[in-house]
Amino acid sequence: MLLAVKDLSVSFGGVHALNLSHFNLRDKELRVIIGPNGAGKSTFLDILCGKTKPDSGEVLYNGIPVLGKTEVEIANLGIGRKFQKPSVFPSLTVYDNLLLAFKMKKSIFASLFFKPTEEIDFRIREVAVKVGLLKELRKIAGELSHGQKQWLEIAIVVLQDPKLMLIDEPAAGMSDEETEKTGDLLMQLAKHHGIIVIEHDMKFVEQIAQELVTVLVRGKLLMEGSFEDVRNDQRVIDSYLGRANVQLENF
């Protein structure tokens, strides 16, 4: 098991943000987590990457306890996070953004005398091909479309060589064409990485949900099942219609 979570709980100001009884993810599994706003989805990812400290619970990554470790320590173990809003360096080229993300020593001394090797250049171009940005490598990142910035951030995570990728709402703000390309990209990446995706776009969820979909409501696990099971579950429909104003036709 790549990830095993048990009795994970965290509160903010006395309000339970997450009270997750269990969550398991196999290696090279793509899992989508859905739920209304305030369901605890992003909080869950924040805990997994070390950004938020839980009140109690257990998280094992490859059998290693991760709670209590710093964000850097967790990243070094092999957990990479892509946040909802792209956080690239807009004044640098796409290539330079990827170069900065490359997993290597980043001491002051190493940086002063650093020169990209053929191996590093090959790896950057290899990842750029995967995310569809090979022709944009010399372009200033701030000039990219919203979808391209999302792909650049995914590429930055891939360059960290994580075994587990945490992806927060990748389809938000994308065109239909960009959304479909992003779904294809994530399914390709799932051949080499475990991936957890948070998403609200049900058409996108339907595209990428290969096995289980996890539904969170009020910080708790409501159900897990196939996309069809989730779409037809009355509890899920009621939760979305009552709490997030999602139209019934989205299901």
Image (spheres, grey):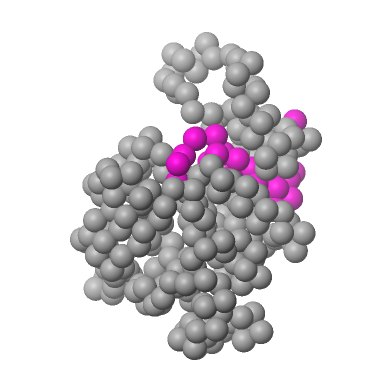
At which x and y percent is residue 200? 57, 70
Residue 139 in sight from this viewpoint:
no
At which x and y percent is residue 16? 29, 73
Residue 250 vertical placement versus 127 (above, below):
below
User: Which residue lies at the image location 63% right of the left edge and 29% below the top edge?
Assistant: 124
Q: Is residue 140 magenta?
A: yes
User: Which residue lies at the image location 39% right of the left edge and 77% below the top edge?
Assistant: 222
Residue 176 vertical placement versus 116 (above, below):
below
- Going by the picture, which residue comes out furthest to the top? 113
Residue nearest the observer in this picture, 56 or 194: 194
- Residue 232 lies left or right of residue 18; in this view the side is right
User: Which residue lies at the image location 44% right of the left edge and 18% below the top edge?
Assistant: 108
- Residue 91 lies left or right of residue 112; in this view the side is right
Residue 122 vertical placement versus 97 (above, below):
above
Q: Quadrant of residue 18?
A: bottom left
Which quarter of the image is occupied by the C terminus? bottom right
Tell me where the magenta segment starts and ends, as one range: 138-165
Q: Is residue 109 magenta?
A: no
- Going by the picture, which residue comes out furthest to the left? 56
- Residue 230 lies left or right of residue 72; in this view the side is right
Residue 128 in sight from this viewpoint:
yes
User: Which residue lies at the image location 52% right of the left edge and 78% below the top edge?
Assistant: 229
At which x and y percent is residue 31? 49, 60
- Residue 122 lies left or right of residue 175; in this view the side is left
At which x and y percent is residue 86? 59, 50
Q: Number of labelled discs?
A: 0
